[in-house]
Image (tube, rainbow, N blue to C red):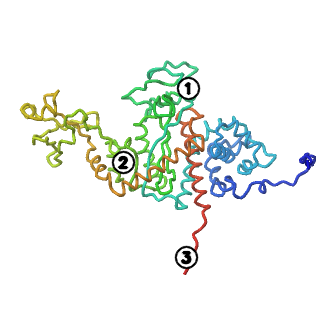
Amino acid sequence: MLGNRVGLQDRLFYAFDLEDRVPNDHLLRRLDAVLDLAWLRAELAPFYSHTGRPSVDPELMIRMLLVGYCYSIRSERRLCQEVELNLAYRWFCRLGLEDAVPDHSTFSVNRHGRFRDSDILRSVFENVVRRCVEAGLVGGEGFAVDASVIEADASRFVRVEGSEIDWTDEQQARRPIREYLEALDGEPSPINPRQKPKALSPTDPSAAWTTRGRNKVMFGYSLNYLIDMENAVIVDVEATPTRISREVEATETMIERTSRTFDLKPGRIAGDVAYGTGKMLGWLREHRIEPHIPVWDKGRRDDGTLSRGDFAFDKDRDVYVCPEGKTLRTTGTVHDGKTLLYRSSKRDCDPCPLKPRCCPRAPSRKIPRDINEAARDHARSLNGSEAYNQSARDRKKIERLFGEAKRNLAMTRLRLRGPNGARDEFLLTATVQNLRRLIKHTSRSPPAPAIA
């Protein structure tokens, strides 16, 4: 039998409570149980005037941003529309049915103003990390580091070839360009002084022209994560232009900041071969961190001639010894700030029967040695050990975090421009990912008591 239409909406008054409309197992209810933002207003108070009209509650805006990044709503205009209509979003943001939702322009004003001046998004991220530490999710023994390329909000079809642009006054007034020009005189520079970029974006010049992203070529930023390998908690995050040298430098920054902020110093760190440079390995050795990282080695030759590995290094005499027993010595001059050159004598090389296989196009043999070669040798000695192999397996957790960020949280292309915009988006993404792990941990049932 055909039923009657229901829901005529003819009642004037309704008994309604948002608390009753959000299920106990709803993601936002579980997230609210582990989120603590009671400290936020006090930290932001110095950045507000004591006179004038009351501002929008900063905790409300942070909660709205967390909702947006939790549900892949990164458009602030759309986020405001969704919070207006969604009861669970209203409940999480502490809004009643009749409370007004902030205008989307309010986010822009605060993001580019007091939120960045106070670095509040990093404070929120670090607060969540502390809660993960308190919950026992962070072991602090083994870290992993890696970077993933995120497309910048800059068209790859609109670019200027080379590293120089004659900026107009109108362009220099735009925030991403102004930040880029100011950063050129600072440290670190947004471009590599030893290798100028092949192209610049006129809308976001700090983004790097790269072939490593999802497109053949594009402008991008690198999402750098430092994670604790025990439960894949992100202990630090950094935004850099997509250049391998900047990603490696970011590792030092993240490790030092993690040690300073949380008093966490790992005993070992895992990474791919991009982090196996002499400078990086030397830094890790200096800080007594075991590098479970493949060594970046370009010393092996594939043209049939003798490689550097065919020469034995005598540490006590500081010389290389060739297969014929002759020595190669160095003057001690450091080239390019990182390399010593060991040279043989022409008198030894001329009558040598191995000369056609050793230095066929040169009068004598020359071997470069990194000033951090001892650290490289130490890293090689760890390769293949049980601890190294375990770190190699655990390091895959960081890849899953990148996959989660891109697939589930739609972090495939940035919406904000400039390094500060990338940093804001990466911090919010990492905060949401850590909150999800904290939720999962706190919702586990306690272990059953042992039966006597």
Marks 2/3: CA–CA distance: 41 Å
Mark found first going from the N terminus, 3 or 1: 1
Q: Which residue is mark 1?
A: 155
Q: Residue at x 60, y 34 (%)?
A: 415
Numbered mark located on residue 293 in the image: 2
Q: Secondary structure at mark 3?
A: loop
| Horizontal arrangement in the rendering, residue 155 relative to residue 147 (left or right) | right
Marks 1/2: CA–CA distance: 35 Å
| Horizontal arrangement in the rendering, residue 91 relative to residue 415 (left or right) | right
Residue 440 point in image, percent of width and height:
59, 57
Mark 2–mark 3 contact, CB under 8 Å?
no
Q: Residue furthest front?
A: 1
**Quick one: label 2, few (<14), some, or many (20+) residues within 10 Å?**
many
Residue 16 point in image, percent of width and height:
84, 54
Q: Nearer the viewer, mark 2 or mark 3?
A: 3
Mark 1–mark 2 contact, CB under 8 Å?
no
Q: Which residue is mark 3?
A: 450
**Quick one: label 1, few (<14), some, or many (20+) residues within 10 Å?**
some
Marks 3/1: CA–CA distance: 61 Å
Q: Residue at x 53, y 44 (%)?
A: 403
| Horizontal arrangement in the rendering, residue 185 relative to residue 44 (left or right) | left
